[in-house]
Image: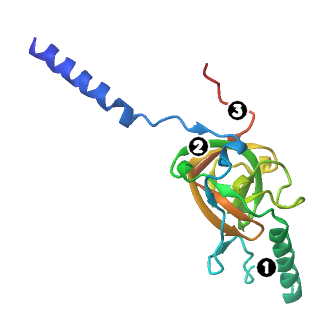
């Protein structure tokens, strides 16, 4: 009888603790979910003294000083083409999310992708002007991102941060920490 009571007590304690042990499923976001209601949110703003991510390192740039200056000028032109006045949703800060998108590389370490931007459509920030800052997510690295699929859509899962970041090609409203990637064709099941 004592053994049975101990087992029941143990199981009851485990049931109480279960929600804190099992991580919550990530919140699946669509790009429009990153845009706050009109009159709400905080503006995407990059202070002049703020660090800019994704700038090419002159020491590793393979080209002349003129080539390097032209590259920096081209990147700055992209930034000026970005629509201004975007707002982000601070209540999403710290949430574990899952969001689909396309990768726009910012930097490589050797041949491995380092920093990149997750954007809602292929070619954003490279072939087309950058979307508004609340439609770009900065990622410093992602586990599972396969180089061969770099230009195909992916799902990224991680902890979302709602904080303005300046990059070489665009001002960004969000970043994703501890990101993991999987092919977009692995669409999550919808619960009814």
Give the image location of residue 118, x and y in percent: 72, 53
Calculate the distance from the C-alpha at mark 2 to the C-alpha at mark 1: 35 Å
Report the mark closest to the observer, 1 or 3: 3
In terms of depth relative to the viewer, which is nearer, 29 or 142?
A: 29
Instruction: Name the residue carrying label 3.
Output: 186
Residue at the extreme bottom: 65
Report the mark closest to the observer, 2 or 1: 2
Give the image location of residue 157, x and y in percent: 60, 44
Give the image location of residue 154, x and y in percent: 73, 43
* Disc nearer the start of the sequence (1/3): 1
SS at circle 2? strand
Instruction: Name the residue carrying label 1.
Output: 61
Q: Which mark is residue 97?
A: 2
Report the mark closest to the observer, 3 or 2: 2
**Image check: 23 left or right of 2?**
right
Give the image location of residue 183, x and y in percent: 72, 39
């Amino acid at each position: 009888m004592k053994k049975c009571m101990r087992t029941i007590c143990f199981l009851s304690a485990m049931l109480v603790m279960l929600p804190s042990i099992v991580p919550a499923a990530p919140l699946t976001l669509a790009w429009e979910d990153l845009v706050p209601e009109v009159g709400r949110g905080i503006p995407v703003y990059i202070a002049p003294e703020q660090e800019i991510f994704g700038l090419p390192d002159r020491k590793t740039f393979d080209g002349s000083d003129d080539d390097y200056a032209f590259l920096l000028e081209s990147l700055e032109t992209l930034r000026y083409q970005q629509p201004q006045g975007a707002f982000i949703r601070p209540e999403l800060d710290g949430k574990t999310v899952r969001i689909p998108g396309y990768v726009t590389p910012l930097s490589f370490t050797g041949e491995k992708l380092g920093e990149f931007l997750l954007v809602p459509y292929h070619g954003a920030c490279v072939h087309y002007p950058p979307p508004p800052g609340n439609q770009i997510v900065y990622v410093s690295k992602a586990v599972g991102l396969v180089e061969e699929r770099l230009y195909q859509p992916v799902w990224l899962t991680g902890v979302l941060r709602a904080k303005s970041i300046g990059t070489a090609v665009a001002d960004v409203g969000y970043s994703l920490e501890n990101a993991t990637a999987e092919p977009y064709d692995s669409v999550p099941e919808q619960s009814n």
